[in-house]
Image (tube, rainbow, N blue to C red):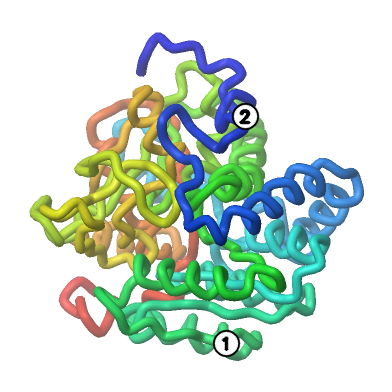
C-alpha cells in the first residue's frame, strides 16, 4: 500500500481530456476525432439524465438478473485452510454468463439514444461478442463483431451464440489472428461508418471516453459486492482480487474500494507459458509506456517498439496493453499486479469446479489461482474474488487439450 490519499479519486480521474495521470487520452486519426467528440458529448449528457438511469436500472433488474450474489465458498475455504474465507462475486450469473453485459447494455442504450443503428465490437473470448450481440437484439440494432481466427476456432460455442443472436461475424486473419487484430479491424470498420455506428469497446481501453464509460457501467459490480460483503461479514474485505486483460471486470469491482483504506487490491495478469517474449500477456507487469488503439498506457513491445506478440490460454486476456487506469493505479501502487501461469489457472479451474460446483471462465481462473496462493500465506483474512465469467465456453477446449488434468 502507499501513503497517498485516494479520497475523491473517482471524480479526479480521468480529467476532461481523458487522462489518468499521463495515461489515456485520445491518439486517433483526425477523421475519428469528430466521432469521438460526439460520443463524449452524448455520453456525458445522456448518462446523467434520470430517464437514462431509470431505464438502465430496469434493464439490470429485469433483463440481466442483477444484483448477482456474493457467495461464501465454504468448502473451498476449508480446503485451503489457515482460517481464511473466500467470497466470490458471481458475475458468472449475470445474463450471458459474464460481467460484459454490464457495459454492453449501457453502451447500446447510449447508441440508441444517439440515433445510431449499428453496434461494432471486437471480442477475444467471445463473451463481449455474445453480450454486444445480446444488447443489439434487445435494442433492435445491427451488430458486427470482429474476432481473430484463432479465437473463432477456440471459442466456437460463443461464435454460434453470436450468430443465433443475429450478429455478423468478421473473422480476422491478419497478424496473430487474436484480440489485438480484432480491435484493429473493428476500429477500421468504425472509421468507415461512424455516422451510423457506435464502436462498443469491450474493456476499459481505447481512446476517451471509453475507459471511463466502461468503468462507469461496470462499477455496479463493486457497488453490489461492497454492500453484500458488509452484510455477510460486517466488515470490508482484506483483499479484492480480479483478473486483468484490458481490465474491465477489475475496474468494475476495484472502483468501489479505491477510495477506501485498508483494502488490498490485486490485479492478476496472464503469465501464460513463462516470462519470455511472446509467451505471456502481462502488460502491467512487463510492459513499457506506449500508444496503441488510440490511448497511451503500459504495453508489451517488440524490439521495434511495436505491440509485441502475446499469449494466454484465456482468450480474453491475450492483449498487449492494459487499460490506462490500471497503468496509473500500478504507478501509484494502489493496486498490486501479480501473474499466474496457464498451469496454475487450469488447476484453479478444476479445483473450484470440483469443490463448489462452479465452473469458472479461464480468465476468472487466473484471479482464483492467485487467491489460492495468497490463502496459503495469510491467515484469518476475508478474500473477495471477482468471478467475472462462467467456463461453459472453455470446457471443450480444456478437455480436448488438457485431458490429463481431469
Instruction: Say whether residue 165 is left or right of residue 296.
Output: right
Q: Nearer the viewer, residue 224 or 44?
A: 44
Position of the C terminus, as image quadrant, is bottom left
Image side of residue 338 versus residue 228, left or right: left
Q: Secondary structure at mark 1?
A: strand
Relative to 319, residue 268 above or below: above
Q: Quadrant of residue 32?
A: bottom right
x and y, in percent, of residue 11 in the image? 64, 26
Q: Give percent across and percent down for residue 237.
A: 49, 29
Look at 58% across and 80% down and name the residue there.
144
Q: Quadrant of the N terminus?
A: top left
Closest to the observer, 4 or 86: 4
For label 2, the residue is 230
Determine which quarter of the picture holds residue 375: top left
Q: Residue at the far front: name it.
A: 30
Residue 214 location (% of width, % of height): 59, 50
Residue at x 62%, y 71% (from the top left corner): 132
Amino acid at each position: 500500500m502507499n501513503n497517498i490519499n485516494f479520497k475523491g479519486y473517482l471524480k479526479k480521474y480521468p480529467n476532461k481530456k481523458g487522462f489518468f495521470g499521463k495515461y489515456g487520452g485520445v491518439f486517433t486519426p483526425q477523421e475519428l476525432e469528430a466521432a469521438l467528440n460526439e460520443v463524449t458529448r452524448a455520453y456525458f449528457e445522456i448518462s446523467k439524465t434520470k430517464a437514462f438511469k431509470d431505464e438502465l436500472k430496469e434493464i439490470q433488474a429485469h433483463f440481466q438478473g442483477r444484483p448477482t450474489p456474493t457467495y461464501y465458498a465454504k468448502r473451498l475455504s476449508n480446503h485451503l485452510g489457515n482460517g481464511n474465507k473466500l467470497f466470490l462475486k458471481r458475475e458468472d450469473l449475470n445474463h450471458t454468463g459474464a460481467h460484459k453485459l454490464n457495459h454492453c447494455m449501457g453502451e447500446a442504450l447510449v447508441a440508441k439514444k444517439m440515433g445510431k443503428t449499428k453496434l461494432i465490437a471486437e471480442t477475444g473470448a467471445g463473451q463481449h461478442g455474445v453480450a454486444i450481440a445480446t444488447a443489439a437484439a434487445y435494442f433492435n440494432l445491427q451488430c458486427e463483431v470482429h474476432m481473430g481466427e484463432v479465437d473463432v476456432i477456440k471459442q466456437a460455442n460463443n461464435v454460434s451464440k453470436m450468430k443465433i443472436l443475429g450478429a455478423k461475424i468478421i473473422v480476422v486473419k491478419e497478424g496473430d489472428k487474436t484480440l489485438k487484430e480484432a480491435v484493429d479491424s473493428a476500429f477500421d470498420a468504425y472509421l468507415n461508418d461512424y455516422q451510423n455506428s457506435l464502436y462498443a469497446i469491450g474493456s476499459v481501453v481505447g481512446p476517451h471516453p471509453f475507459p471511463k464509460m466502461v468503468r462507469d457501467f461496470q462499477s455496479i459490480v463493486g457497488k453490489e459486492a461492497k454492500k453484500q460483503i458488509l452484510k455477510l461479514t460486517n466488515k470490508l474485505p482484506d483483499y479484492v482480487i480480479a483478473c486483468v486483460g484490458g481490465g474491465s471486470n477489475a475496474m468494475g469491482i476495484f472502483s468501489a474500494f479505491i477510495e477506501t483504506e485498508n483494502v488490498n487490491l490485486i490485479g492478476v495478469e496472464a503469465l501464460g507459458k513463462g516470462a519470455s517474449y511472446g509467451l505471456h500477456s502481462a502488460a502491467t507487469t512487463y510492459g513499457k509506456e506506449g500508444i496503441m488503439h488510440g490511448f497511451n498506457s503500459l504495453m508489451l513491445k517488440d524490439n521495434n517498439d511495436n505491440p509485441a506478440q502475446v499469449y494466454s490460454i484465456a482468450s480474453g486476456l491475450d492483449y498487449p496493453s492494459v487499460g490506462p487506469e490500471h497503468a496509473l493505479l500500478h504507478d501509484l501502487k494502489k493496486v498490486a499486479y501479480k501473474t499466474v501461469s496457464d498451469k496454475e489457472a487450469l488447476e484453479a479451474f478444476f479445483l473450484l469446479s470440483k469443490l463448489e460446483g462452479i465452473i469458472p471462465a479461464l480468465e476468472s481462473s487466473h484471479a482464483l489461482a492467485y487467491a489460492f496462493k495468497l490463502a496459503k500465506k495469510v491467515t484469518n483474512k476475508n478474500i473477495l474474488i471477482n468471478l467475472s465469467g462462467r467456463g461453459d465456453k472453455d470446457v471443450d477446449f480444456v478437455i480436448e487439450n488438457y485431458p490429463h488434468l481431469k
